[in-house]
Each structure stands twice: as structure tokens, then as C-alpha cells.
Amino acid sequence: MTGSALITGAADTPVGRLPGHSAMSMQAAAARAAIADAGLAADDVDGVLAAYSFTQPHLMLASAFCEYMGLRPSFNTAIQSGGATACSGIMLAAALVESGQCRHVLVVTGDNRLTGLPPGGAAAMLAQVGHPEFEQPYGLSVPAAYALVAQRYMHEYGVTAEHLAAIAVTQRAHAARHPHAHMRDPITVEDVMKSRMIATPLKLLDCCLVSDGAAAVVISAAHEFRDGRARIAILGSGQGHTHEHVSAAPSLTHFGCEASARQAFARAGVTPVDIDVAEIYDSFTITLAVELESIGFFGKGEAGPAAASGELGLKGRLPCNTHGGLLSYGHSGAAGGMFHVVEAVLQLRGSAGPRQVEGAALAFVHGDGGILSAHCSLVLGRVH
Amino acid sequence: MGKPIPTPTTDSAAYWAGCNREELLYQRCGACGHVQFYPRRTCTACQAGDLDSLQSAQRGTIHSFTVVQRAANPAFNEDVPYVVALVDLDEGFRMMMNVVGDDRLSAAIGRRVRVVFEPRGEQKLPQATLEAAT
């Protein structure tokens, strides 16, 4: 099955503070751009996968989106897997084109959580993912939930706050090279360490941004490809699911990313050392550390020191989150995970400009939803 | 708006009623013996529907914790800094609680705790308090 589904279109809107837009208008802008990037017309798209929105919630967002944009696809549904939504949508889109059910599937995400909600609104809404009886009464926020993971992870593997800070610093350096990034001013480990404590050990600069923005991709059957550009194939995909609520997680050090990555690598027939560039969900610095280690790129406790020594940089052993990730590029709900995909496509096409990883031919993309609860991994490659 | 008060469901009514008697109830599967929390009508290990409700001795160990300096829910602003912990009860189940009391900021992984009950509206909520350090 591998390689017969291609990412033919990929686009995102500007990210950051974008007053004057709605979740729908931004999603439509990203969708238009992705369809155009694929060299298609809207009528060519026969499958549409949407996600969710805080500012324009709807029981049937996929239908509402298609109505908004005037699309009448033959397959249409919404996916709600938090930060795993983008990758899961692409995994499903690949299955739809590989099975012959669809020719071109649009996967669209976007929200305006920054300007479309009152200050603090996104954090308050996100806190509602805590269990209503067994977590929310204890004042659990999403940063606090990840802090529970961080505290245990640091305890077991000797990870330090400075190690985590080095991850944030690396990603900011990458974002500085991206004209769209929400946060582009360089930061130091000291800046991270001095930033306001949110929930020990996580400080403000250990936490992702809240941004407006949207992103979309088009997945096409390989035989439909009629472009002269590089062919970007979905070579492998996988998922892993162990829990939803952090208090019900079977472990605070081993998560579903182990299974999802194993599956994706096996299906693609490659291993972590083969990967040229990694775009991995980074809701918090600890998220990226756990995932880099669980996926097999580094040993336990080694991701932070690797960041500190430049191994995650553009010329490092594993260039990672070359756009700046959720920590510095931007985080707009389900679009947050899609930004990673768009960046991977740009890298594989060789069109990432000043962020280009030379010769990037094989990319690994990973999304995680909830509190390291729902995982989806993709291996993408430039094929001939 | 005040702090969230748990609304018992048909799955959890017996548990919350137990809390109001200052009893901490957990479940053990009648089919496979698996111990679990939170209360539900299916065993998460073998998916049997035969679950016994047992009383915990209300002693446990902190598996992880965080000191929250910035609350997402404004109802908790006055409690900052407050401690959220995952506590492993001695019977083999894990639950979230706040570590409460004047010494709450001494919370640490591995510290022993015992359960106390905090009135919240009409409902008593299990919380953790540190045992004297050994």
C-alpha cells in the first residue's frame, strides 16, 4: 500500500494575531491555497476531512465547512483527535485514495483561538479536556497535566529544566528563519529559565503559543498526479492510543508514540536513522523530549542534551521542527499539527528557503492529542 | 463562578456517596481481579461487567506532582500556588488529588500521603495531605 498516496497540495495562512478573520474564513483560505498548490480546481476534490474549532464549534463541522465553501464531496467527515488530528486526517485520506474511494482528499484545519476568544479563553477551554469529575475539580490545566509528565520524566531520566529550555531555544532559532512565524525574536536558555513559572517545572517559554491560523493539504491517488514537481508520498503511517486523561495514563514515561512510530517505520521500511528531517508535535518542551526519545531518535534523557549541542538544528544530526513548531511558529488548534505537515512537504520539495535541510528526502511527522493520549505518525518521502 | 463540584453520574453515584461518608471506594474486577479507578461498569483489563466496590485504607504515595502558579480556571486563582498530584493508593490504583495543607509545597515524588475530605458545596472531595517525612 505504501507510496500510492501523494501529498499534492500543502498550504498555510499567516499565523499569529489575525483580527478580522473567522475560523471558517481562514480554513477556506488555506483550502483554496492547498487546492491551487495541487494544481487542481475545487471540483476535483471529492473527499473533505475537517477537524474542530473552538470559536465556531459545530456538531458537523465538516458539513458546515463544505457548505461555507460550496463543496459537495462524495466523502466528508470530521476528525477530533486533538493534536493528532492533522496526521490522522492524512492517514485516513491516504486510505481513501489508496482504496479508490476518492481521487483527491482535502484535509483542512484552522482556528482563531487568539483573537476569536477572550484573553485566557483558549487555556480555559482546553482545561475542559480534564475529566469533569476526577480532574477538573482539582484545578488541572493542560500545562499542569504535561507538568505531571515532565516531573516524573525528569525524575526517572535525569532530564533538567535547562535541557528542556534548549529545545525551546532551538525552535525559536528556526522560527526566526520563517517569515510567517508567530514568534521570531531569538531567545536564550536563560530567557526560558527566567520566564514566568506556569506549573512546575514548565515555564511560559516551555509552553506552546496560542495563535490564529489555518493549514490544509490535498492527498491524491498517485495515478492522478500530473505535476512536474517532486512527488511527496505517504510511505508509512501508524497510530497509538493508551488513554485520554492523564490520571488514567498507564505510564507517565511510555506513551502511544512508541507504537505509532514503530508501525509507521515498519510500513515505510525505514528506521529512525534514515530520517532527514523531523516535524514533531511540541505542545510543550517536554512533549517533544518524550516523543523524540519514544520514537527512537534518541535514548531516554538524551533529547535535551542533543538540543543543547545543536543536534536538532538545521545542520544537526536530526533537524527538528524547522519552522519553529508550536512553541514558536504557532499553534491554532488542529492546524498546529498541520503546520508540521506543511513544513515537511516544503522541506521534501526543497522549497523551505533559508530553513532548507540540504538534500531532505525522508521526513517523519508526528502528532499527539490530549495528554500524550492519541498519537499518529507519518513517514513522508520524495519519490520518483 | 466557584470551583467545579463533581456531578455524580449513574456510574459514579456510589463513589461520591462514599466520599460524603469519608470512605474512598475503588473497584476490583470479579472476573480477573484487576483493580481500577475511576468507577465505571466495565473492567479495563478484561472488559467484564462484574465489578466489586471496595474501601481503600486511604494511604498512598505521590507518583508525580506539579505546583501550579497560574490557574486556567479563575476559580482557582486564590489557591495559587496549589499542588496537583497523581497519587498511587496502596491498593494499586492511581487518582488525581490536590496536596493540601500548609506544608503542601513540600510535596515530592515518593512522599507518603493520606486522604482527607474537602467539603465543596454538598459534596466532599478526596484530597491528599503529606504524612510526616521519614
Image (cartoon, rainbow, N blue to C red):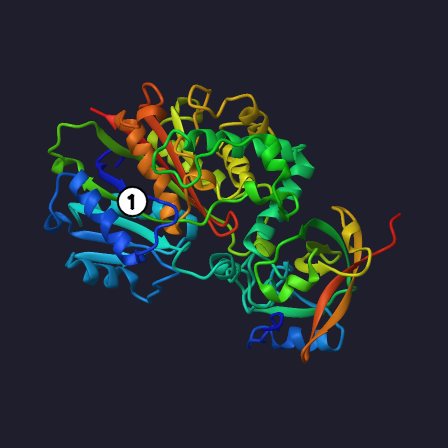
- Residue B27 seen anywhere in this rendered image of the structure: yes
Q: Secondary structure at mark 1?
A: loop
Q: Chain of mark 1?
A: A
Asked if A187 appears above or below A369 in the picture, the reply is above
Q: Residue at x 38, y 41 (%)?
A: A238
The reply to whether residue A98 is in sight is: no
Q: Image quadrant for the N terminus of chain A? A: top left
* Residue under the point 21% across and 61% down: A68
Q: Nearer the viewer, residue A123 or A244?
A: A123
Residue occupying the point 15% across, 45% down: A103
* Left or right: B133 in relation to A182: right
Q: Position of residue A271 (x, y in %)?
A: 41, 26
In this rendering, the count of numbered labels is 1
> Disc 1 residue type?
Thr
Q: Nearer the viewer, residue A76 or B49?
A: A76
Closer-to-camera residue (B36/B19): B19
Is A367 placed above or below B33 here? above
**Label 1 neighbour load within 10 Å: few <14, some 14-19, many 20+:** many
**Residue A7 drawn at (x, y percent):** 24, 37
Judging by the rendered image, the residue that carries numbered circle 1 is A13
Q: Residue at x 66, y 53 (%)?
A: B69
Asked which quadrant contains residue A55, the reply is: bottom left
Could you tell whether B12 is left or right of A2 in the image? right
The percent coordinates of residue A287 (x first, y second) are 53, 41
Q: Quadrant of the C terminus of chain A?
A: top left
- Residue A120 placed where, x, y %? 51, 58
Q: Is residue A252 above or below residue B98?
A: above
Seen from the viewer's position, the closer of residues B122 and B114 is B122
